[in-house]
Amino acid sequence: MAQNDGLDFEAPIVELERKITELENFSNIAEVDLSEEIKKLHARANKLKGEIYKNLSPWQRVQLARHPKRPLTTDFINLMFTDFYELHGDRTFRDDKAIVSGFAKIDNHKVMIVGTRRGKTTRERIYCNFGSPHPEGYRKAMLKMKLAEKFHLPIIALINTPGAYPGIGAEERGQALVIARNLFEMSRLRTPIICVVIGEGGSGGALAIGIGDKFAMLENAYFSVISPEGCSAILWRDGSKAPDAAKALKLTAQDLIKLGIIDEIIPEPLGGAHRDSKKTADSFKKVLVRYLTELKGIPLDTLLENRYAKYRQMGQFLEQPAEAVKSLKHKQPINK
């Protein structure tokens, strides 16, 4: 049975799962039939999961997005793709380990993968800078995307970062400029681009590899201009207000699909992707294959026009009903 590291709202479920494990172990050791009791506890645990996980707050989804056992970019590469061949370097400074990229196949589709690498152990996380790329990481990503364009390969961007690295060295090497250039270049790359937030989608660090023809999110991922903690520190100067900030930021997949920012929510197993990485990957793979098949049938000029229109229409809103706006258009301006 998959165990988690005990997020606060999961405590009742963790306790029930512990009891189930104890009963199963005792039943095996003592050779006593406790199947009925175990069955009842399983039913109780499933009911509790349904009550908790189907009514998660934005802050609880942020916690799940950061779960230490949540599948990472490298996990999804191993679970969904074959023939992965990693590519390195930015030809300018160094190979940033916070970005992983390379050729791969998914079913019969050849693709270029570009994603954020975070690492699983403490040593790996330090090696990957906890998934916060430097400018050379984003240059590396763009070089590989340009290579994909050259060989007519669709790009799959897997996003999972708390944000771009904000240190002095990164700023000295042009962090903001590199991110801006990536946004510009991705907007006009002549090849299909699919972007998916699989965990955290923090600030410009996520957006730097997040411009595409299709944009999806895993069910318990988040995508935001700033972290809830950063937002609460700025607005209230109080980190404990992070749950309030998470709600105000509208950062969940459920919020963003209503706002028209993303195209689809990829379902996770009850309890989160960390409870069944394989099941999550199977759902994820079906969506990617569907997108690839759809996008490959669109002429490139039309693809770029659609991509441009997709981002131009984001953020539009009306302060008056649409009919009132139409009537105003026919009125002549008053000359003073």
Image (cartoon, helix red, strand yellow):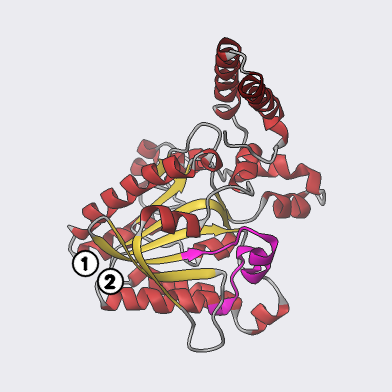
Residue nearer the viewer, 229 or 72: 72
Residue nearer the viewer, 331 or 245: 245
**How many angstroms separate mark 1 from mark 2 (CA)?**
6 Å
Would you say residue 75 sits in the magenta stretch? no
**How many discs appear?**
2
Q: Secondary structure at mark 1?
A: helix
Q: Is residue 323 above or below residue 29?
A: below
Q: Which residue is mark 1?
A: 300
Q: Residue at x 34, y 43 (%)?
A: 326
Q: Is residue 48 above or below residue 79?
A: above
User: Which residue ends up furthest to the right in the rendered image?
Assistant: 238
Q: Residue type at mark 2?
A: Arg
Q: Which residues are magenta?
A: 115-136
Q: Give x and y (percent) for residue 277.
A: 48, 44
Q: Residue at x 61, y 26 (%)?
A: 52
- In the drawing, what numbered circle is on residue 190? 2
From the viewer's perspective, tell me whether residue 139 is left or right of residue 294: right
Q: Give x and y (percent) for residue 336.
A: 48, 59
Q: Residues within 10 Å of mark 1 (few under 14, many from 20)?
A: some
Q: Is residue 290 visible?
A: yes
